[in-house]
Amino acid sequence: MLGYCDDIIVRPGQELTFRVSGRGAETFRADLVRLRHGDTTPGGPGFRETELDSEVNGVYPLLDQPAHIGSYGRLPGARDILRSPDGSLTLFAFVQPTTDGARQPVLSAWDAAISTGVALVLTEGLRPALVFGAGRDSRCLTAPAGLRAATWYALAASWDGATGLAAVTAVPVVNPYNSRFGRLVANHLVQVTGTLDGPPEIPAVDLLLGALDTTDGAVVRGAYNGKIALPAVYRRALTGDEVRRLATSGNAPAVTDGLTAWWDLSAGIDSTAILPGGTPEPDPGAGPGGGTGGRTGIAGRLVNMPTRAVTAHNWDGSSYNWTAHPELYGAVHLHADDVDDTGWAPTCTLPVGADLPSGVYALRLRAGGFEDHVPFLVGPAPGHEKSIALLLPTASYQAYANEHLSSGSPLGQAVGGHTPLVQPLDVFQLEHGGFGRSTYDLHADGSGVAYTSRRRPILNMRPRYRFTHMGTWQFPADLYLVNWLTEKGYDFDVICDEDVHRCGVAAMRPYRVVMTGTHPEYTSEPMLDAYEDYIGGGGRVMYMGGNGFYWVASFHPEKPWVMEVRKGEAGSRAWQAAPGETLHSTTGEKGGLWRNRGRAPQKVFGAGFTAEGFTGSSYYRRMPDSAEAEVSWVFSGVGEEELIGDFGLERGGAAGQELDRADVRLGTPPGTYLLASSEYHDDSYLLVVEEIGFMYPGLGGSEHRDVRADMILFETESGGAVFSTSSIAWAGSLSHNDCDNNVSRITANVLDRFLKPGSGHPANRHRPGGRPSA
């Protein structure tokens, strides 16, 4: 039994819809709970939740709902598109298949429920075939040879109503850039002819790219892995010579005689639209009056977010920017495991009343001894904000959603440095596989996952969840901060990345202090701008983690629950975007590291990613700056020689998992105080790859000086200030000894000071050669 909700954050006066599916019981119990702490590691606070009275509490039917998975394109009205006087037709598309397997539809007008229609498919061995179906009477013309994976072909299937002759033709379209193998590898024409009884019976379905229909559109059957470009339909059978001429097409069909419809996938790249083609290229082979030369007006829609802004058959390396040359990017990359919305029916709705304070909540589901939590956030009502905002990094939760690092990455165990800890939810995810993947995973065809959605059950966004290699991570780790703020008696609001992305600095401006989560790794440009504007305008930020503000993220303009990431040519990355495909489809901006776009995190937060390791955590030692009068208050109650954070739930220390360092060369503001640094990390902690020009011995924690976490503080001329812990593990030490420890004390000292109005020292900020202070 699992569930998800439509939004990640709601406010008083709004409603939140939950969607639940399961099996093994007729009903389940739902209850609203407020979450406080999730990690159940011995020695910590344990799991903490508070049950609440709510209208949503109750018993509901437990329905077994199928997950909608696999991307495809839908063009309405196959009968209208394929109509011709005698049933003659040609189905055409450029294809670059990426995996072999069962029947993969390229273009289909097929009702799988009654096995009726016509389809151009790839069968086992990537052999192209034309299929006619009329119930049990199914006819198929299949090529004797298959296509080469990751190679572009001009693929056509035709049927002549006058003769009953059918043909399937695949012409290789290879240049030095566009396929896995170059021109030196022989790629042969694939062709077959034969007779098929016809005409084909066209059911009342839509014309689909990459899928077979079920008439009601409820569940897609069949899926295609690979790229498709320039799909087109003709109302006559094309000859072999015409197909070879079609293979020379750019971003419009080179053969126009008898052209009924074609679709320009280079248009609307930042959307889910499939737009009809415009005026085709001139057809030198058409006779007088040949060619249609116009748009059909039949537009369609892409479903489940196939990847756009990908290179097409005509990409020649002359441009790497789809916004400047969209004609080279007229393809979509379909995957059988794409998902942007699981598509479950609503189960129940929570009305958010004015009496529900801002915080972290969940709908707890129970049935037959099984329990699940569907987390969500409640933000403050406008005009009723408190002084502290805990800004949770929901973009990063989404980036890691349902990651398969323990099972899908051959390097996962080596990076973690220990045997993965596999939980029942991990096994369930492997067995079922219907809930999509994370941006740390590869699709089934080996391409990287660029889109991630929150409209699906996210199994690792559960309060008790422990990531297989990293331990308590992301959402469960951020509950450390929720618990500490609550335990220490601070009044605080909870807001999230999506608030800041949508509203900019206005989402942060009501607060005197903004605390980040433990690992705000993914950020959009509006989010980064908002932080900079907030601090520059006098706001105070406590950066409570490590490896933050690292990857460029963007959100889909039509589907704000879908986030995009393109792993570029640097950074600690689970995959790398294909050549020519580093720009985001949703915004057109360059993906990859913010550092490589001139916005290293050091510029805004004083520290940025430097090393990672997962076998154990270390501690901090105070640096000379910590004794200076302007900042000595940070260590009130902490001895000069006292080791900071040599304890904690995250492998025994406060400095661990992923670490940041200060570096003036990367933009750490001059005058920043280096308060403390970690030491004695072992060699499972390695310098990050973007720091390495050449490989050489000594890149591990026992030797390299940059493998450390730097605790820093600086203030701006406007009175804004930043305190950075530079370690993901820091928050895991807060609860030690019932929050009576030096990590907790330092955090409270900074928060209390930042909350005081006018707590800076303007004279020192302007003293020549002096340091800014907080």
Image (cartoon, rainbow, N blue to C red):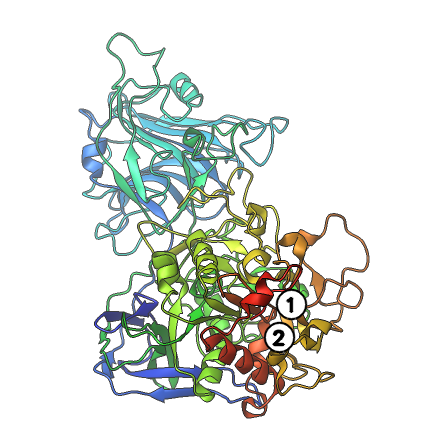
Q: Is residue 436 above or below residue 389?
A: above
Give the secondary structure at mark 1.
strand
* For the residues bearing labels 1 and 2, Cβ distance under 8 angstroms: yes
Q: Residue at x 27, y 43 (%)?
A: 110
Q: Residue at x 49, y 65 (%)?
A: 720
Say which residue label 2 marks: 631
Q: Quadrant of the C terminus?
A: bottom right
**Which of the two residues, 528 or 763, is positioned nearer the viewer here?**
763
**Which of the two residues, 106 or 671, is positioned nearer the viewer here?**
671
Q: Is residue 714 visible?
A: no
**From the viewer's perspective, is 667 left or right of 159?**
right
Q: Residue at x 42, y 72 (%)?
A: 512
Q: Position of residue 711 (x, y in %)?
A: 63, 71
Q: Is residue 766 above or below residue 109?
A: below
Instruction: Kindly identify which numbered label has been placed on residue 658.
Output: none
**From the viewer's perspective, is 316 left or right of 209?**
right
Say which residue label 1 marks: 673
Q: Is residue 159 visible?
A: yes
**From the viewer's perspective, is 694 left or right of 270?**
right
Q: Categorize mark 2 by other alpha carbons within 10 Å: few (<14), some (14-19), many (20+).
A: some
Q: Residue at x 40, y 33 (%)?
A: 330
Give amino acid for label 2. Val
**Which of the two residues, 224 or 735, is positioned nearer the viewer here?**
735
Q: Quadrant of the N terminus?
A: bottom left
